[in-house]
Amino acid sequence: MTNQERHIAVWENCLQIFENNMDPQQFNTWFKLIRPVSLDGAKLTVEVPSDFFREYIEGAYKDLIRLTIRRAIGADAQLFYLVRPVQNREGMLLPSGQSATPTNNPVSIPTYQPSGTPSPFVFPGTQRVRINPRLNPEYSFGNLVEGECNKLGVSAGESISMAPGKTPFNPLFLFGGPGLGKTHIAQAIGIDIKERFQNLQVLYVTGNEFKTQYMDAVKGNRIVDFIAFYQRIDVLIVDDIQDLLGQGSQNTFFNVFNHLHQNGKQLIFTSDRAPVDLQNFEERLLSRFKWGLSVELTRPDYETRLEMLRSRALREGVALSEDVLTFLASRIKTNFRELEGTLTSLVAHATLGHRNIDVELAQSVTGKIVGEQETEVNIELITQTVCEYFNLTRDMMLSKSRKRQIVQARQIAMYECRNLIQNCSLSTIGSELGGKDHATVLHACSTVQDLMSTDKLFRQWVEDIEHLLVVPVER
């Protein structure tokens, strides 16, 4: 048997094992579509239709696949997937299992006696640990589509990755609505830094995780060790910093921030709102968030959405017609996450249903995922809707009148603007609704929430107005 024939024979042997250990329909749907490409020593390469296809079988049949190729090839067997080329582009060769993930070198961290209060006469011990940077290799700059919506954030991130802690962008504060790429950019910076500076300690953590770790350290009387751990980080990425609530956790984070910043370490934060709009944060911490560069990520425009779909389709190994691409880019306007989710769902429907991806299928899939509105919700529409509901004129609602009905109508309008409009700051809402400041808008939103929980009639008003604003078009 020649080497060219051996990979076919080995894969046929694997197929027999797969067929004997799974449902026939599942075998026909997934494994009969895989084609053997080559066998180089113990490295077997097979071709799959798309990256979605690879991710699915890796998730659903990972253990079976691993055991099978080891049985067919040997204990040192390796499986690689070749995603089928799209048009004239080269295919992507991906290893079985998770892609290579950035790692940190082991680091020594000082530890203190259980009291948590080190004596100046007692030399502390050291603990040598390996810190998991918790970076997802999928969130790289190479997988990021740049547009006007994120251009400044990407440019700042690339500058930071070339000289972490040495640029004016420290800290870098990325803010914006969900699904706009804050986590992607933040992690891409960390991944790029690890590629350039392997000795630096990089750590990604969420605000809620930091708070939970702090509480555990307090309970275990290990708060000094907790602080010592974070003081050894060279690049600290805190996602969803708005969740870092609590005086104790904020005070500890304040000390960590000061130590890292004063020692030239890089700090990167993401939030769903601007620093000025963060609630229940110490003023001294908010002022430090503003030391570096604050960048707002906005909703992607049509061209950026179209380019993102092309890029993602290439990664999936899926050929999409221009009609399908333009339909999806026109139909889904909210954020990158909805675009990716819709494309994944579209590929899944086509794969499982053995259908071609056309506009008809795209219409069917998107109709089940995203709702379509007659008019894009904005401050003007919300103001008009609230005025009509309470039979008020615009001038009346925006006046300085303290009549209860007018005040409540204005507060409801502010509340709906805050909840329904992407990337609209509190300052903008206040300015448009009577020239108020962001503190007034915060108070209005809090008042509406309190009244909704105690006043059934008031809650009905808010629900009625929200229904008028977001009810989908009858198709």
Image (tube, helix red, strand yellow):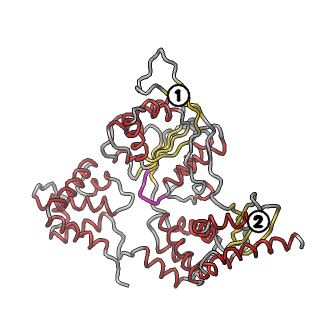
Give the amino acid at mark 2.
Answer: Leu
Residue range in magenta is 175-180
Q: Main secondary structure of the magenta part?
A: loop
- Asked whether residue 420 is drawn in magenta, I would say no
Q: Residue at x 47, y 39 (%)?
A: 292
Q: Position of residue 389 (x, y in %)?
A: 18, 71
How packed mark 2 is, by other alpha carbons closer than 10 Å (few <14, some 14-19, many 20 or more), is many
Front-most of 104 and 196? 104
From the viewer's perspective, tell me whether residue 465 is left or right of residue 105.
Answer: left
Residue nearer the viewer, 326 or 4: 4
Residue 324 horizontal/vertical position (percent): 56, 78
**Label 1 vs 2, first from the N-terminus:** 2
User: From the viewer's perspective, is 101 left or right of 404?
Assistant: right
Direction from residue 77 to residue 293 in the image, left or right: left
Question: Which residue appears at 59% of the width and 33% of the height?
Answer: 128
Instruction: Judge left or right: residue 143 versus residue 409.
Output: right
Which residue matches tag 2? Answer: 44
What distance separates the C-alpha of mark 1 from that of mark 2? 46 Å
Q: Disc 1 residue type?
A: Pro
Q: Which mark is residue 110?
A: 1
Q: Secondary structure at mark 2?
A: strand
Q: Report whether residue 278 is seen.
A: yes
Question: From what the image shows, is residue 237 above or below residue 321?
Answer: above
Residue at image position (30%, 56%) is: 429
Where's residue 230, x and y in %? 49, 35
- Determine which quarter of the picture holds residue 133: top right
Find the residue positioned furthest to the left.
403
